[in-house]
Image (cartoon, rainbow, N blue to C red):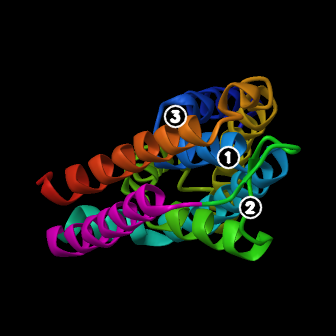
Amino acid sequence: MSLETWLVFAFLCFMAGVSPGPAVFLTISNVIRFGRRAAIISGSANAIGLVVLGLCIGYGLGGLMQASAFAFTMVKIVGGAYLVWLGIKSWRATGNFIAAEGGEIAPDEVSLFRTSFILSITNPKAIVIMGAMFPAFMQAESSLWLQSAIMATTYAFMCFIVHYAIAYMGEYIRPFFQSSQRLKYLRRVIGSLFVGFGLTLVATR
């Protein structure tokens, strides 16, 4: 892949990363509720998950999903069910409010990482985007492994930049949510978005 081609690919990856989706909303929720560190952990887990997913797609997962309607339907059901579960969990959350820190008690780092990682590798949006973009930039004469690694890493890095920016900008709006009532509304809005995403994925044919 030439430098010019890579720059075009990187730009498309960045635009895909900026578009609203479950992973973006999860990072927004984490930075407002738990702080910058939690959002960076979430964004890092999402990026690692995208690398894993991208490598799988580069080696044929995208083709499998296109060839098998049943396989893609199962991925959508699993991803949609996980989003609905996250939404219900957000609605039911009653985390303690800490006035001194302006947020809730954050889950441990392993829980934050696991939640975002699972969301990343079961996100049909990422599967569809990478499954559509990767073949368009693949070159038959070059190493499949190397090309898959480069494109997966590029996509993950561009998405991480977006999440990193959200983590830092989110700190400026956290003071607005230094209220248990506002945090409650935030949890319910984010939860509703997750449930909506999940049900849409399951219902879409």
- Which residues make up the magenta segment? 69-94
Residue lying at 47% horizontally and 57% vertically, measured from the top left:
90
Element under label 1? helix
Q: Position of residue 194 (x, y in %)?
A: 38, 51
Residue lying at 31% horizontally and 69% vertically, measured from the top left:
81
107 displayed left or right of 77: right
Q: Are marks 3 and 2 in contact (CB under 8 Å)?
A: no
* Disc 1 crowd, CA 10 A, few/some/many (<14, 14-19, 20+): many
Q: Give the quadrant of the C terminus.
A: bottom left
Q: Position of residue 99 (x, y in %)?
A: 81, 43
Is residue 92 covered in magenta?
yes
Of badges 1 and 3, nearer the viewer stands 1
Residue lying at 65% horizontally and 62% vertically, measured from the top left:
51
Q: Nearer the viewer, residue 27 or 108?
A: 108
| Residue lying at the far right of the rendered structure | 100
Q: Earlier in the sequence, mark 1 or mark 2?
A: 1
170 displayed left or right of 64: right
Is residue 56 covered in magenta?
no
Please name the residue that numbered disc 1 is placed on. Answer: 33
Q: Position of residue 97 (x, y in %)?
A: 71, 51
Type of residue at label 3? Answer: Ala
* Disc 3 crowd, CA 10 A, few/some/many (<14, 14-19, 20+): some
* Disc 2 crowd, CA 10 A, few/some/many (<14, 14-19, 20+): some
Identify whether 71 is placed above or below 136.
below
Type of residue at label 2? Answer: Ala
Q: Position of residue 89 (x, y in %)?
A: 45, 65
Residue 16, labelled with which disc? 3
Please name the residue that numbered disc 2 is placed on. Answer: 106
Q: Give the quadrant of the N terminus.
A: top right
Q: Distance of mark 3 from mark 2, alpha carbons?
A: 29 Å
Type of residue at label 1? Answer: Arg
